[in-house]
Amino acid sequence: MLTKEELKANYKKFNDDKLLNLWASPQRLSTVAQEALRDEIAERGLDTSGISRDNRPSKNEGEIKVPFSDTDYSEPPENTYPGALKIYLTNQKMISNRMMFFIPMGIILIIAGVLLAQMVLFLVGLALFFLSYFLKATIGAQPQLVIYKDRLLCYRDSGRSRRRYSEVGKLMNNNTMDTIPAENIISVEQEGPFSTSPLALRLKGKSKPYLLLLIADKEETADIKRMIESTYQLASA
């Protein structure tokens, strides 16, 4: 259960409209969550006098439902993976930065299509621009690694660049994760000398490392490595 301070930190990431929508549906929130929400609304000076509140009891009274995209990368809703020790989400900022790469490409194609009088080129650029902008604005963070006491749920990175985008797409679509029993994990190491180098699991009976498919910055990567080592009592590599 999240504390009031943790809930307030989450609510600070919400825009005004989302806060007011939650205020209108208090049955979705626990008592502590309602108090944190009330404090945040008061701090912003938002007017709630004209909002009709739905106080019907929730089917899961006491449960707070927070969308993935509005949570910290390591604090998703507890009821998503019951019994999980920690769940890591994709880094939203890194996803947005990657999508930004395609927006100027779309603009370049649009300009080239106009200058060369190529309608197909123009339409491709237009589609790429709007699709990239739309995805940047709407893609939310998704679970990418789940740590249980007796197993690890994760995605595998083949390491082949030609499949990189399809694998990231698989991760963002929240497809079925691989399940690795804790007793099969020998160690977790970074496959390279840099802090952003990918993490790899050394598994019993496997000669090749299992590369973890992650969208995480260096701090998150280091935290994931420490958490795996401490949970499964592995020697630090």
Image (spheres, grey):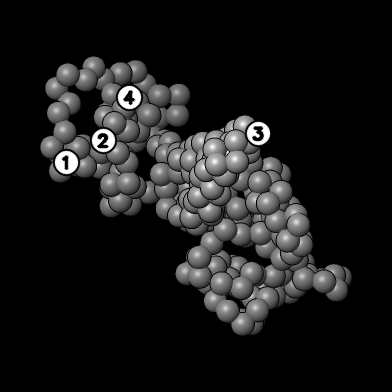
- Of residues 170 and 164, which is closer to you in this image? 164
Compared to 56, does 91 lie above or below? below
| Residue type pointed to by label 3 | Val
Q: Residue at x 50, y 50 (%)?
A: 104
Q: CA distance from mark 2 to mark 4?
A: 15 Å
Q: Is residue 89 in sight in this rendering?
A: no
Which numbered disc, 1 or 3, marks the residue closer to the eye? 3
Residue 25's label in the rendered image is: 4
Q: CA distance from mark 2 to mark 3?
A: 41 Å
Q: Residue at x 74, y 64 (%)?
A: 159
Nearest to N terminus: mark 1 or mark 3: 1
Quickly name the residue at label 2.
16
Q: CA distance from mark 4 to mark 3?
A: 48 Å
Which numbered disc, 1 or 4, marks the residue closer to the eye? 1
Nearest to N terminus: mark 1 or mark 2: 2
- Expressed as whole percent of the image width and height from the top left, the position of residue 145 reads 61, 56
Residues under numbered marks 1 and 2 in contact, where contact means CB atoms less than 8 Å apart: yes
- Expressed as whole percent of the image width and height from the top left, the position of residue 218 reads 50, 70
**Which image quarter is the C terminus in?**
bottom right
Apparent side of residue 104 relative to residue 213 in the rendered image (left or right): left
Residue 120's label in the rendered image is: 3
Quickly name the residue at label 1.
44
- Of residues 157 and 81, which is closer to you in this image? 157
| Residue type pointed to by label 1 | Arg
